[in-house]
Amino acid sequence: MERIIVTIIVFFVIYLLYYITVLKNKQKMENFENSGQAAFIIKKYKLDPKKINKKQFARSIALTNSFIISITFLITDLIKNYILKLLIGFIMLIPLIILGYHFLGQKYKKKEVNKHV
């Protein structure tokens, strides 16, 4: 139970940091489509950047990234050996990023088709 509470705290801290550094920064929000994460999702799922609400898209990516990091933290927190923690953490990050961005891309692709972006 204690680990789940710590994981939820990690989730909110990561999201808060992303919110302060990206979502509240007008200059970063203007160039958000060119960021690595947004550009990857837009290009892979062939989304039209003109139809996407930048702020909502940035929030979705922030939530996805916070979820990925907090789940990775939860799993690696169970391991005692630091080298093994690092190895498992890197191994877990790749599939979690791919899955998280896949679900996000599919969600926005479906919204784009339904014209509710």
Image: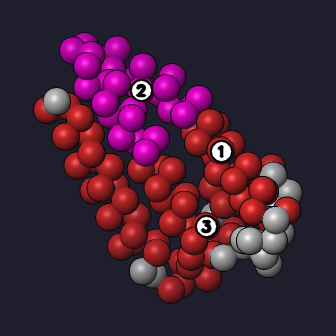
Q: Tell me which residue sits at (49%, 26%) in the image.
A: 92
Judged by its main secondary structure, the magenta piece is helix
Q: Position of residue 49 (x, y in %)?
A: 78, 72
Residue positioned most to the bottom: 26
Q: Nearer the viewer, mark 2 or mark 1?
A: 1
114 left or right of 66? right
Q: Earlier in the sequence, mark 2 or mark 1?
A: 2
Residue 103 numbered tag:
1
Residue where numbered disc 3 is placed: 57
Q: Position of residue 9 (x, y in %)?
A: 23, 49
Q: State the CA–CA distance, disc 2 to disc 3.
A: 26 Å
Q: Tell me which residue sits at (63%, 75%) in the image.
A: 54
> Tag 3's secondary structure?
helix
Residue 89 numbered tag:
2
The quadrant in which the N terminus is found is top left
Q: Nearer the viewer, mark 2 or mark 3?
A: 3
Q: Which residues are magenta?
A: 67-96
Q: Is 94 above or below relative to 25?
A: above
Judge the density around disc 1: few (<14), some (14-19), many (≥20) Cα neighbours within 10 Å.
few
The quadrant in which the C terminus is found is bottom right
Amino acid, disc 2: Gly
Can you see residue 112? yes
* Residue 98 sits in quarter: top right
Residue 73 numbered tag:
none
Judge the density around disc 3: few (<14), some (14-19), many (≥20) Cα neighbours within 10 Å.
some
Can you see residue 43? no
Q: State the CA–CA distance, disc 3 to disc 1.
A: 13 Å
Q: Position of residue 96 (x, y in %)?
A: 54, 34
